[in-house]
Image (spheres, helix red, strand yellow):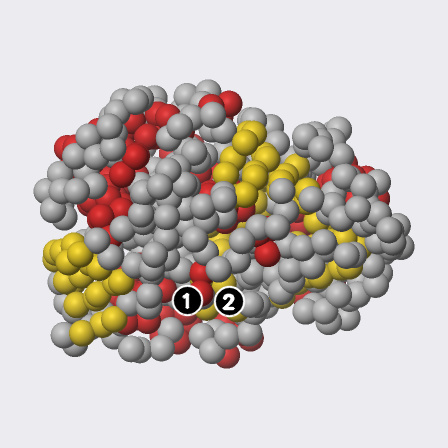
Amino acid sequence: MIRRMVGVGLAAGALTLGLVTLAPATSSGASTPTTASWAELPQTPPNYIFPFMSLAFFSVSTINQFQFLMYRPLYWFGNGSTPNLNPSLSLAQNPVYTNNGETVTIDMKPYKWSNGETVTAENVMFWMNMLHAEKANWAGYAPGTIPDDIKSISVDSPTQLTFTLTGPVNNYWFTYNELSQLTPMPNAWDITAKGGAPNSGGCAAAPYGTADAQCKAVWTFLSKQSGYDPANPKAANNSMSTYATSPIWKVVDGPWKLTHFDASGNVTFVPNKTYSGPVKPTLKKFVELPFTSESAEFNALVGGKVNVGYLPFQDVTKGTTNALKAGPNNPRLTNFKLSPLYTWGINYFPYNFNSSGGGGSAGKIFSQLYVRQAIEYLVDQPLYIKKIDKGYGVGTYGPVPSQPDNPFVSQEVKNNPYPYNPGKATTLLKSHGWKVVPHGTTTCQSPGTGANQCGAGIPAGAKLAFNLQYASGQQSLTQLMTAEKSSWSQAGINITLSQASFNTVLGVAVPCTAGTKACSWELENWGAGWIFAPDYYPTGESIFQTGAGSNSGSYSDPTNDANILATNVTQVPLTTYENYLAEQLPAIFQPNQASSLTEIQKGLKGVTPQNPLWEINPEAWRF
């Protein structure tokens, strides 16, 4: 799916503490705690509540760790320590494919909304009608995929609907990457003004694809209620203070209801007493706590003010010799158990292939494969894993995750097509007409498109000098950026580093049109790449297909598009797709650091096994 970016930040600053102060695990005879607190990553608070959003809001912290607690997707993924479909937590029975896979029938389970409405097939149609009308504003959209591949949808009964597709598909792909995007929405949201009667917007109950104008009006209203104004997309979100009080967002079908939210990231949930799912909360309150720095979060752990947090990499006193197993915990955290989490994802950050930066030549330079190869030859992933990640990391060498263990990753991707080699990087640049100035700035001496020339659109004197903004809040990311800047300088690739908040970086790193002011960015690193969710089958259409909503750098390659299409509509393995893209380097691949060295207070059960999609399920937590 859906797109999920992982945010990890960095920086220093004081602790932004939540609404409660919690004591460490209770001793014998003490009362059992009824509130649990969880630490957000520094400077990475959730920042959007409406579960239909563009890439600028499409983050793990907003979706997996906030929205999903209130608004359940049609199908839940993450089963134990795997990213697999979890039928028991899904709102519908497993889809049934007939007619050679061109017909898909979905039967709803008996779930309720908190306002008493039943979660129905019409609520799914509501989402689909909105997607039909506003696919350009849905971050999970890729041309040719849902809704483009839907011929018709019929609501057969309040509990059943049938999708008729435009042609055969890979059934596994359609379940894991298409149906996975759907989030049923209540009739109470089908409005265009505060206080409107349910279904007065005319979007939910309309036959599929016949109410685009009405759905656009509903989408615009709900977006504004969430703080995004389509007419002024860069305006600040001034609606966050209303998230916990608005009657719109109080209608939930998940296990939790929101009682407090602020722009800093202080979030408080209480149980939804009408939740229909099989795992109901026993905690009376669940709190998410924001932090401005890792040191503040670590001090909160030491002081017993957080029940579930994470160990900053700089506070790992002794590394691990096995990336998948916890080494010794920090001796100051004797009341916690350490559990490393590797998410179902890859770590990369995008080139902006449409960039007008660098005097207008940055995008043209990034479009040259040999330049991308030179840059990747200077990324020493094994060294960074050892020195910066303290052993808690695995390589990212292509578009398919190497961890958790899975049958999809190829041997070529595992073996790294571009191992660290400064000599090859320098030779590549020299052989294409560049004057390499180690620890200076390399420039183009032979413009043109012939042999031994720099390439199309690159003028004489063009510089391998780029701006790279990365997310603040995490010391290990600063260390990585500093190390890579130094390594790239060996070939005269001059990188100017700067920092901004995770949400700021994410808002900049969006697809843009060449030649526009918004397209001047060159390199943006939000900190941890992509979790494959809701595109749980890692076929790549969400992030690397031409025109995809989450294709941050506007990468485009017809061969890659054809390879992706083959994985979507046939049963071919991912090998051709992933090997080609691993060689073509659509982005800068980096080590996949453990997403969280999770610290779990002793006595708190149900936190493990951790979901590799970085979803949290505090309804399962028990003291």
Q: Secondary structure at mark 1?
A: helix
Residue 50 position, x and y percent, is: 39, 36
Q: Could you give the CA–CA distance between mark 1 and mark 2, rounded to whole angstroms?
A: 9 Å
Whole-percent x, y for residue 414 in the image = 54, 74
Residue nearer the viewer, 601 or 476: 601
Q: Residue at x 21, y 41 (%)?
A: 204
- In which quadrant of the rendered image does the C terminus lie? bottom right
Residue 162 place in picture, x, y as percent: 18, 61
Q: Is residue 468 left or right of residue 321?
A: left
Say what secondary structure mark 2 lies in: strand
The first of marks 1 and 2 along the sequence is 2
Residue at image position (22%, 48%) is 122
The residue where tag 1 is placed is 87
The x, y position of residue 27, in whole percent, is: 87, 51
Query: Depth-wise, is mark 1 or mark 2 nearer the camera?
Result: 1
Q: Residue at x 87, y 54 (%)?
A: 28
Quarter holding residue 202: top left
Write down the residue under mark 2.
79
Q: Is residue 511 left or right of 604 when viewed as pictured?
A: left
**Residue 470 has which mark?**
none
Mark 2 surroundings within 10 Å by alpha-carbon count, few (fewer than 14), some (14 through 19), many (20 or more): some
Check disc 2 and give the amino acid type. Answer: Asn
Amino acid at circle 1:
Pro
Identified at 68% across, 32% down, the residue is 18
Give above or below for 205 relative to 386: above
Left or right side of 234 for 318: right
Crowd around label 1: few <14 · some 14–19 · many ≥20 (10 Å): some
